[in-house]
Amino acid sequence: MNDRKKSGGLLLSVLLGLLALLFLLPILVIFMNSFKGRFFIADAPFALPSAETFAGVQNYINGVQKTGFISAFGYSVYITVGSVAVIVLFTAMTAWFITRVKNKFTSLMYYLFVFSMIVPFQMVMFTMSKMANVLSLDNPTGLIIIYLGFGAGLSVFMYCGFVKSIPLEIEEAATIDGCGPVTLFFKVVFPILQPTAITVAILNAMWIWNDYLLPDLVIGRQYKTLPIAVQYLKGGYGSKDMGAMMAMLVLTILPIIVFYLFCQKYIIRGVVAGAVKG
Amino acid sequence: MQKTLKKYFAIFALPTLIAFALAFLIPFLMGIYLSFTEFTTVVDAKWVGLRNYIEVFTQNQDFLNALWFTVRFTVVSIVTINVLSFALAMLLTKGIRGTNLYRTVFFMPNLIGGIVLGYIWQLIINGVLYSFGVTITAKPEYGFWGLVILMNWQLIGYMMIIYIAGILNIPPDMIEAAGIDGASSFQILRKITIPLVMPSVTICTFLTLTNSFKLFDQNLALTAGAPSKQTAMLALDIYNTFYGRAGSEGVGQAKAVLFFIMVAAIALTQLYLTRSKEVEN
């Protein structure tokens, strides 16, 4: 390698390092401010905490109390895990069924699922939340059913693409060996679908964990998930507790970052697969 | 096998189908019907024909303003996000040490939810504007560029990953051969790299297009439309029409139908473009 290339590489590394820092800066600023007194944040968000402005974990205590953080976290976990589990399993079964049973009804179902992917949420938000209310689905468990219906489009579509590539011979052999459809699905088909199942799980988990408007309209009055808790912290005019807000932002981001660092490979792969197909 | 499987409809397809009908299909059809009626609680709907659709444009300018704001925002976002993420992808495919670490960092904002993103950037932009004695809601331009910066921060890493995949697909001997033939690195970029990553460009353009066009959470958290609805995008305007004051639910639903038609048109264009590309190849 000649000198020019070497210095170019160094320059590039410095540039990228600065860019990476710039990308992390917003999160670092929030983190730093979460330890400052509530009245020292809006005026000087870029000043480091000093002896005068340092507030210790007071913001965290305030924020957790004001937002009911613990219960919001619990609802978010329950709704996300429950919905993802239900979506991953049921849409796989549905996708297998409508790919293997070929008739007018199943192809109509397929097109309806695909169609639902291009409909924006605002189109159905009013009628859907009224419907949930009438059918008493306006609780965390009911919300899981709503998410199954809403997530079905993309998930069925992604599974269908994969099911088509599974050779029929495998399933025929198992059937000849005396497997009924239910055993066949759980013992043979579902294990083969595993890569797509991971992608479907990640895409839906990211969507549901961060979703604000749907849970707010359906269960927001009684049950607050994390995004709803953050939004409601804003409160009326001028009553915003900036310290509590910073602490809540940190507590909301932290689990996502930890999860991301552990499952990075799957998350990036899943998101790209979803982008290319969706 | 198909015959036996058919009998298992209730186990395999019915649960998803019921949830799908309740959460999507019935509300969708009701939504279309209600856009032609006057209603406050769904059951008291009174047929009014096209009146709601006319009122979308005549009652006030909100919808058209929101549409114009959304279109401007979407165009600026598409250009900035795609140029920057492509440039980053080029840098990260040069085999520098620590490429994986950079990829991890740049992609991370994509995982943070819209509401949280909005409040993060509200603090930072207000902090910068504080030295000029104003806040983000002082002028619509502040909100506009605030949203653009936020959207760039969120989506650059995501698009970058798709571009990296596209760039790594280019056979390295092609670039090497061009280099031996005396092509400058700019010529290689223009004549080889860019034409060969066109499929990625299409994907990223439409991803930024739909994400920007349908934006809601970030818009709500960052400015909530302030000052006086001037930074409200389409989705937020529809939300405000529904829940802002009683009596305009019909107009809100009509706006939602128009919004749906626009989004569907974008999706169909994308489908058409990717299909025709596939035939070419």
Image: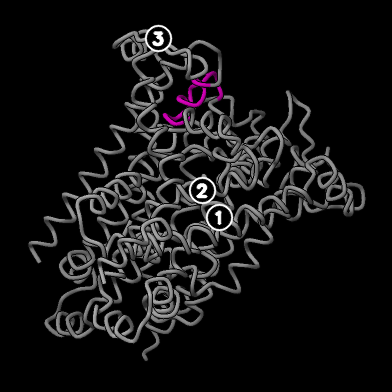
Locate residue A168: give its quadrant: bottom left
- Tell me the amino acid under the disc marked 3: Lys
Cα separation, mark 2 vs mark 3, equals: 31 Å
Report which residue position mark 2 lands on. A147
Cα separation, mark 2 vs mark 1, equals: 6 Å
Mark yes or no: residue A181 visible: yes
Where does the image place residue A177, in percent across and percent down from the top left? 34, 87
- Tell me the amino acid under the disc marked 1: Ser
Tell me the residue at 53%/48% (across/down): A145
Task: Report if the CB atoms under discs 2 and 1 are less than 8 Å apart.
Answer: yes
In this picture, residue B7 sits left or right of residue B138 = left
Report which residue position mark 3 lands on. B46
Q: Chain of mark 2?
A: A
In this picture, residue B179 sits left or right of residue B145 = left
In the rendered structure, find residue A83 and report the number of the disc placed on it: 1
Tell me the residue at 59%/27% (across/down): B137
Q: Compared with residue A183, is residue A153 higher up or lower down, i.e. above or below?
A: above
Is B233 covered by the magenta stretch?
A: yes
Q: Compared with residue A156, is residue A199 higher up or lower down, i.e. above or below?
A: below
N-terminal-most mark, 2 or 1:
1
Where does the image place residue A66, in percent across and percent down from the top left? 82, 40
Q: SS of the residue at dot 1?
A: helix
Magenta span covers which residues? B226-242
In front here: B269 or B7?
B7
Q: Quadrant of the N terminus of chain A?
A: bottom left
| Figure disc tally | 3
In the rendered structure, find residue A188 and report the number of the disc placed on it: none
Q: Chain of mark 1?
A: A
Cα separation, mark 1 vs mark 3, equals: 36 Å
Does label 3 lie on the same chain as label 2? no
In front here: B67 or A277?
A277
Q: Quadrant of the C terminus of chain A?
A: bottom left
